[in-house]
Amino acid sequence: MSKLRVGNIQRFSVDDGPGIRTTVFLKGCNLRCLWCHNPENITSDKILQFHKEQCVCCGKCVQVCPEGVHEIREGRHTVNRERCQTCGKCVEECLYGALSMQGQQMTAEELETEIKKDTAYYRKSGGGVTFSGGEPMLQYENLLPLLQKLKKQKIPIAVDTAGCIPFEWYEKILPYTDLFLFDIKAYTEKLHLELTGQSNQNILENIFKLQKSGAKVWVRIPLIPGLNDNREELEAICTFLQSMNGIERIEPLTYHSYGVGKYEISGLNYGLTGLEPPDPQMKKRYRAAFSGLPNVYWPEEELD
């Protein structure tokens, strides 16, 4: 039986579509965005995470690990992830929550059971389930049976995507998807390549095709200070969006550093260390840049 590679399930989300939602983060991504806020889901593999502030250096992980991943010297715990086979023995032994294994494989039936637990909240709030990532569409073949099951249950479905896939994959899930949350990270191809490691030609083509297909689309634009927020780039993005009809909502998303801690616990390096969120003057400039577009939504915390 085919399984989906799941990073985590976040309940009571209000940032990934309308209403109260259950967001299912699927693992694996074909972009390498410098500011990624979910770096633990870039890889399709499981990741051993180490929360050093919760470690008491008891040494139980050292005793049970067959690969010598853990070492404790002079009260300091180091983790050699290159040796880790993600067997999870150390996680089972850790009584203090300092070690966790991020990622699991779940069947469509198992995920359906988890998602249905929050049905009452979806109905009262106009919410539903959102599949995010990573790039959830990289697992579209295994995701499709789950979407079909949820559609029969009349659970609203959103898919959060970066768009760097063949459009034929979207066509497979279109009949079962109520909303696409579609990222535009840059308009200029050279800049997009520098920021994400991929061209954006098929991304821009895909959003046009989705819109023409009659799909409900919300466009989200991450604004990263000093990278994609210069006047020329913002004007290019706005001009592109003005050329499209039927985009229900546009969400400019200002940079924050909430995800930085995920890099440390996952043993990953953050490439934008020291980057500060935009100040009020920069936010004012952002709002001015998007003022000519219809249906622009700024999250409340960004309107200070």
Image (cartoon, grey):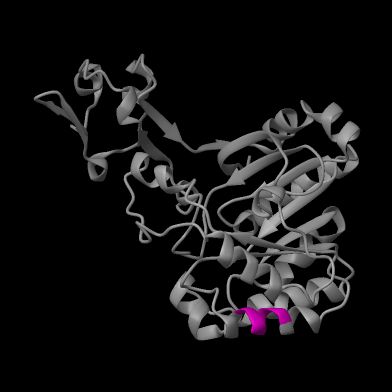
Residue plotted at (69% across, 49% down):
143
Please name whichever residue, 258 or 247, is drawn nearer the observer in this view of the structure: 258
Residue plotted at (85% across, 45% down):
156
Residue 290 placement: quadrant:
bottom right
Q: Is residue 165 magenta?
A: no
* 267 relative position to 133: left or right: left
Residue plotted at (76% across, 42% down):
129
Return the x and y of residue 121 as percentages of the image width and height.
Answer: 83, 30
Among all residues in the image, which is located at the extreme front?
A: 281
Return the x and y of residue 230 as percentages of the image width and height.
Answer: 54, 79
Please name whichever residue, 116 or 270, is drawn nearer the observer in this view of the structure: 270
Please name whichever residue, 73 or 27, is drawn nearer the observer in this view of the structure: 73
Residue 163: in sight, yes or no?
A: no
The quarter in which the N terminus is drawn is top right
Total marks shown come to: 0
Return the x and y of residue 297 as percentages of the image width and height.
Answer: 77, 59
Please name whichever residue, 246 or 256, is drawn nearer the observer in this view of the structure: 256
The main secondary structure of the magenta stretch is: helix
Residue 169 placement: quadrant:
bottom right
Q: Is residue 235 magenta?
A: yes
Specify start and end residues of the magenta stretch as a single range: 234-238
* 63 relative position to 248: left or right: left
Return the x and y of residue 11 as percentages of the image width and height.
Answer: 68, 32
* 177 relative position to 43: left or right: right
Image height check: is 113 above or below 268? above
Residue plotted at (38% across, 47% down):
263
Among all residues in the image, which is located at the extreme left?
A: 74
* 199 relative position to 72: left or right: right
Image height check: is 9 above or below 147? above
Residue 68: in sight, yes or no?
A: yes
